[in-house]
Image (tube, grey):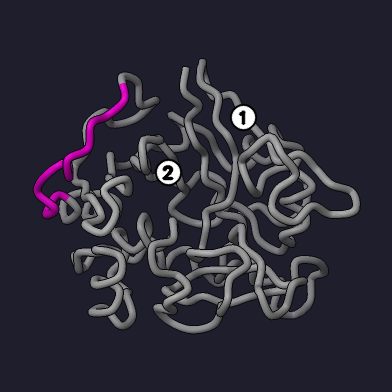
Amino acid sequence: MIQELITKYANLGSSGGITLPAYTGPGPQTLIGGYTDPTDFNKKHGLFGEVLSVDFIDGETLASAIGLEAGVPDNTDISWLKFYKNGRIVFVPANILRHMLTWEDLYKAGAVYGNDGYGAYPRKQATVQNARVTIGSDTYKVMLLKGTNSDPCSMAVGYDSPASYGSEWDRLLYNVTSTVYDTDDAVAADNIPPLGLPDIEQELASENGRYSWCQERSYYRTNYKVVRGNAYIFRFPKTGLVPFNVNAGWTPCLELEVK
């Protein structure tokens, strides 16, 4: 499936005007395709290809490195997709790494926002969001993807919701899926070419963790956080394994720190 993704992604046909940094980390070193958002030239995105967990990191090693004990391991040896995103190199697993864990579990591990502060909405026991992992000689910030275009999110239910347009989830993962709902709107809003790629984004809606936690909270229900999966946007309570939350999974984004 990954190889089919790489072959079809190359249909983009160019690097999308992207100038790569001198060092891009492990895995493929050239883009197989990229694009620039015509409405914002600072938004440039591309795919390098696949990095096997044996050449990068597996889910259990990553969880242990950041002190994350909550949840049930899943797809621990899944491959990673290496992306270019707005001047940064990021790696996203092709499926969830853990399920049956809460957003609050990830916040307590410092693995939501990827910064040296407490995040947008500090808790009473605020945790600095600076989870990092060393892989080889490189250091990576560990965070969640942004699933909407604002925080708090004004609306977080539905397929191809306008609240998702331009989000990191759409810009990266909609290029590696064949399941894009309301395709015309998605293309118009996000410059997403309809490539008919394998369902990587649908894989992130697997049986055990059919949605993935994202950074944002709901505007209308402040105790709820955004989840994404299978081209759908929804919201779950950030704490407690209530019936919905058992389906929420961990899909981390690892950002290579500049040397």
Relative height, residue 172 to residue 191 (above, below): above
Residue 15 forms part of the magenta stretch: yes
Q: Name which of mark 2 and mark 1 comes first in the sequence.
A: 2
2 or 1: mark nearer the eye: 1
Kind of residue at disc 2: Trp
Asked whether the beta carbons under mark 2 and mark 1 sit within 8 Å of each other, the answer is no
Question: Which secondary structure type mostly characterizes the magenta part of the structure?
Answer: loop
Amino acid found under the numbered disc labelled 1: Val
Q: Position of residue 113 (x, y in %)?
A: 63, 47
Residue 188 located left or right of residue 148:
left
Residue denoted by label 1: 133
Q: Is residue 80 above or below residue 156?
A: above
Q: Residue at x 72, y 51 (%)?
A: 106
User: Which region shows up in magenta?
Assistant: 10-21
Residue 20 at x, y percent in the picture = 27, 29
Quick one: quadrant of the N terminus?
A: bottom left
Q: Label 2: which residue?
A: 80
Could you tell me which residue is drawn at 30 percent across and 70 percent down? 189
Secondary element under disc 2, as helix, strand or loop, is: strand
